[in-house]
Image (cartoon, rainbow, N blue to C red):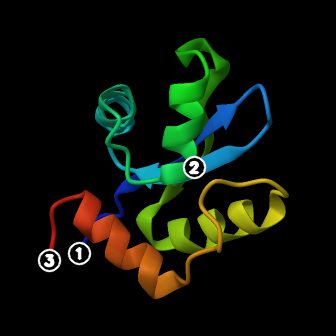
Amino acid sequence: MRLKQKCTVYMILNTVNQRAYFGHTTNLKNRWVHHKSMLRAGRHHNPGLQADWLAQKESDFDFSIVKERSESMLYEERQLVEQSKGSCYNVPPLTQPELKARWYRTNGRA
């Protein structure tokens, strides 16, 4: 029997323009450290988020948990969250296969 791994849907909110970046992970602390490291180095994979980070202060961005879910429920939940936001850095919403592929890449699985 395979146990379901707990996944967290998180948001990085630009508090100045209210644009948000959504992500998901099974290791929230490491993921936030990675995002901040890439943003501070100017090498984040999301060009819109990176541009705003460089143009503004780090304190203008808020990192928060949106939901915690089992892995099997994560993809549907994250897509619903992304589609419900009017201003989002990661647009267009990803399909379930794309989300699953990104999850496996992020978590080191082929």
Q: Are marks 2 and 3 in contact (CB under 8 Å)?
A: no
User: Label 1 belongs to which residue?
Assistant: 1
Image point 44% across, 86% down: which residue? 97
Q: CA distance from mark 2 to mark 3?
A: 28 Å
- Mark 1 residue type: Met
- Mark 3 residue type: Ala
Quarter residue 107 falls in: bottom left
Depth-wise, is mark 2 or mark 1 nearer the camera?
2
User: Label 3 belongs to which residue?
Assistant: 110
Image point 30% across, 35% down: which residue? 34
Q: Is residue 107 left or right of residue 90?
A: left
Image point 55% across, 83% down: which residue? 95
- Residue 68 in view here: no
- Residue 91 in view here: yes
Q: Secondary structure at mark 1?
A: loop
Q: Earlier in the sequence, mark 2 or mark 3?
A: 2
Above or below: residue 21 compared with residue 34: below
